[in-house]
Amino acid sequence: MAKARTIGIGMDYSITSKSALKWAIDNLIEAGDTIVILLVLSPKSDPANKKLFADTGSPLIPLIELKEAGVCKKYGITPDSDLFDMLDNVYTTKKAKVVAKVYWGDPREKLCEAVNLLKLDSLVLGSRGLGTIKRVLLGSVSSYVVQNASCPVTVVK
């Protein structure tokens, strides 16, 4: 049996980030792995617990707590039933441990920070599919993370 891995999934509730999660479930995640859903919220959001965890991000939030409305509100998380269904399914079928961690700030920097702090074995991100000009002007989170993360990064279109 292979060593259990810790796999991060960048999540912004977009179709592409949910596709990345689905890809990871179908192709990467095995029994015993830990999935860390990484949510990077706007630094302008002001949930109750942000003041406590602004620098380090939230503590790891187990899936059972993540689904509670009160917990979501404390961290400024948007409850998403599709996401919760996917996570319940991988927990049940693949016996993977599922947790979430919330950061506030620039997604590029916070995702790279999470890789190091959580000692991720792999990170999976969705791609918005920006054209060359928009990518140069707006910047691409996935491009930045691929270049700067200290673990393998998979970008799913």
Image (tube, grey):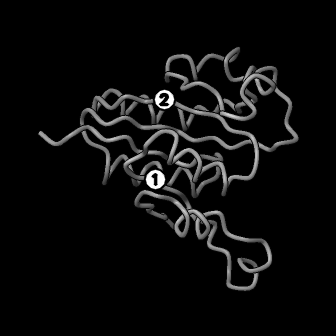
Q: Quadrant of residue 44?
A: top right
Residue under numbered circle 1: 123
Residue under numbered circle 2: 99
Q: Position of residue 33 (x, y in %)?
A: 31, 37
- Left or right side of 155 for 38: right
Q: How would you rate the neighbour count of disc 2 (Cα within 10 Å): few for under 14, some for 14-19, many for 20 or more?
A: many
Residue nearest the viewer, comparing 54 with 122:
54
The relative height of residue 114 versus residue 89 in the rendered view (above or below) is below
Residue type, label 1: Leu
The residue shown at (24%, 35%) is: 31
Farthest residue in the left direction? 1
- Residues under numbered marks 2 and 1 in contact, where contact means CB atoms less than 8 Å apart: no
Q: Secondary structure at mark 1?
A: strand
- Left or right side of 9 for 139: right
Q: How would you rate the neighbour count of disc 1 (Cα within 10 Å): few for under 14, some for 14-19, many for 20 or more?
A: many
The residue shown at (74%, 52%) is: 106
Residue type, label 2: Val
